[in-house]
Image (cartoon, rainbow, N blue to C red):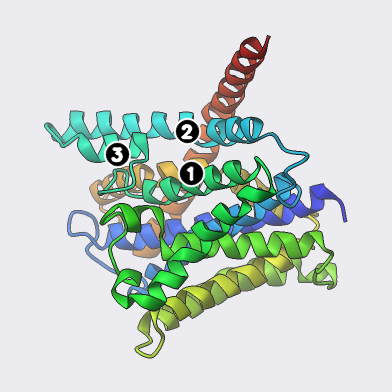
């Protein structure tokens, strides 16, 4: 199986993940009185937060993929850190500052501290935009991986980072339910994020050892249709369970995400719709960081137009989020990644010479 095929399947899964997150936020924001004041699916799509877990699992897998199974002999920690920095940080800074300036101009005097914490990815306290909480955990994960690439003797640091939240939650059940970013410990060792990263790493290592699922190509569409439905239904059932502890709930969700990931790795993109989903997957970072603003703008426009159909409003808003995210990805995000990477790599070469 070619590496291109592997990435194709992961990009399709990224598209599913970001669409789940967008569905969750569309439902939540449209339920606000200033928009439609209606939960169009009765709160069912609130389980779309499982898209975040799927993103975390995918990130764990991708890191194993790009570092060839955490091979410390073939990977420079500096090069890895530069690539991850350029991929995440410059565009994040742009989005956070744009969000702050837009809010300041429209609302007036607002607290800059949540935006400052978002820019710095500070582990304690709330951040704005709120979805940045996932990125600060992702960057901590990248930092641990970069340290582990200095040699096998540093791998235990990564192992402790991933395993400590589960071990601590077994000792202190209140920790598993603590608000994210409440203190330094919960800010660095997040049960939901770290467990999902670890799951993705395990899938990546298994895949490199040729432990894959074989099935016929017609099941591509079965995954595309069934994965979001399965994730939504299971996440909804788990959230309603009074039996499962947070640890078991987290592990079950991660296992379902891992199964979807393993199946996606055998997908070959063939149809126009599949290629369109791949484009959404490629633009998932842009969509993720900008969709809240797109939802707000769409909601304001639709309510002023006196749009009565909530279903049509939801569909138009989702399409708007996707198109805006893709446009920003193609015109701004990719350019920023290329430029920042070129600048940092040239700076590295100058320092060595």
Q: CA distance from mark 2 to mark 1?
A: 9 Å
Give the secondary structure at mark 2. Answer: helix
Is residue 126 rendered to the left or right of residue 55?
A: left
Report if residue 33 is visible in the image. yes
Q: What percent of the width, then of the height, locates residue 260? A: 65, 69
Res 229 quadrant in image: bottom right
Q: CA distance from mark 3 to mark 1?
A: 14 Å
Give the secondary structure at mark 1. Answer: helix
The residue mark sitting in front, 2 or 1, is: 1
Whether the residues at callouts 3 and 1 have beta carbons within 8 Å, the answer is no
Q: Residues within 10 Å of mark 3 (few under 14, many from 20)?
A: some
Q: What percent of the width, then of the height, locates residue 123? A: 34, 47
Whether the residues at callouts 2 and 1 have beta carbons within 8 Å, the answer is yes
Q: Which labelled disc corresponds to residue 139?
A: 1
What residue is rendered at 57% in x and 59% in y?
Answer: 159
Report if residue 323 is visible in the image. no
Q: Which labelled disc corresponds to residue 117?
A: 3
Q: Which labelled disc corresponds to residue 89?
A: 2
State the residue in front, 323 or 263.
263
Give the secondary structure at mark 3. Answer: helix
Q: Earlier in the sequence, mark 2 or mark 3?
A: 2
Q: What percent of the width, then of the height, locates residue 197? A: 55, 59
Q: CA distance from mark 2 to mark 3?
A: 13 Å
State the residue in front, 56 or 101.
56
Q: Residues within 10 Å of mark 2 (few under 14, many from 20)?
A: some
Q: What percent of the width, then of the height, locates residue 187? A: 35, 53
Q: Earlier in the sequence, mark 3 or mark 1?
A: 3
Q: Is residue 111 above or below residue 174?
A: above
Is residue 122 rendered to the left or right of residue 231?
A: left
In the rendered view of the protein, which quadrant contains the N terminus? bottom right
Considering every residue shown, the one lying at the far left of the view is: 109
């Amino acid at each position: 199986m070619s590496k291109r095929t592997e990435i194709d399947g992961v990009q399709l899964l990224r598209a599913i993940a970001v669409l789940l997150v967008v569905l969750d936020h569309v439902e939540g924001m449209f339920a606000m009185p200033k928009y439609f004041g209606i939960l169009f699916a009765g709160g069912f799509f609130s389980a779309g937060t499982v898209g975040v877990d799927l993103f975390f699992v995918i990130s764990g897998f991708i890191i194993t993929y790009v570092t060839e199974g955490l091979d410390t002999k073939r990977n420079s920690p500096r090069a890895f850190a530069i690539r991850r920095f350029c991929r995440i940080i410059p565009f994040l800074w742009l989005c956070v500052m744009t969000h702050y300036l837009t809010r300041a101009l429209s609302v007036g005097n607002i607290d800059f501290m949540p935006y400052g914490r978002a820019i710095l990815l500070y582990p304690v306290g709330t951040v704005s935009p709120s979805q940045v909480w996932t990125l600060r955990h992702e960057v901590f994960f990248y930092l641990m991986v970069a340290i582990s690439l200095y040699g096998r003797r540093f791998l235990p640091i990564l192992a402790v980072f991933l395993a400590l939240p589960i071990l601590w939650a077994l000792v202190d059940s209140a920790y598993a339910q603590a608000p994210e970013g409440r203190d330094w410990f919960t800010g660095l060792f997040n049960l939901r994020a770290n467990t999902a990263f670890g799951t993705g790493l395990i899938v990546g290592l298994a895949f490199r050892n040729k432990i894959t699922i074989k099935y016929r190509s017609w099941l591509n569409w079965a995954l595309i249709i069934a994965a979001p439905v399965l994730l939504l239904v299971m996440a909804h059932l788990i959230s309603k369970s009074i039996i499962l502890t947070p640890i078991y709930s987290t592990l079950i969700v991660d296992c379902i995400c891992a199964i979807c990931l393993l199946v996606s790795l055998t997908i070959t993109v063939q149809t126009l719709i599949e290629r369109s989903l791949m484009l959404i997957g490629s633009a998932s970072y842009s969509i993720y960081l900008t969709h809240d603003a797109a939802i707000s703008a769409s909601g304001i426009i639709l309510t002023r137009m006196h749009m009565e159909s909530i279903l049509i409003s939801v569909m138009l808003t989702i399409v708007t989020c996707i198109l805006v995210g893709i446009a920003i990805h193609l015109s701004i995000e990719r350019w920023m990644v290329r430029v920042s990477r070129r600048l940092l790599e040239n700076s590295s070469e100058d320092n060595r010479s």
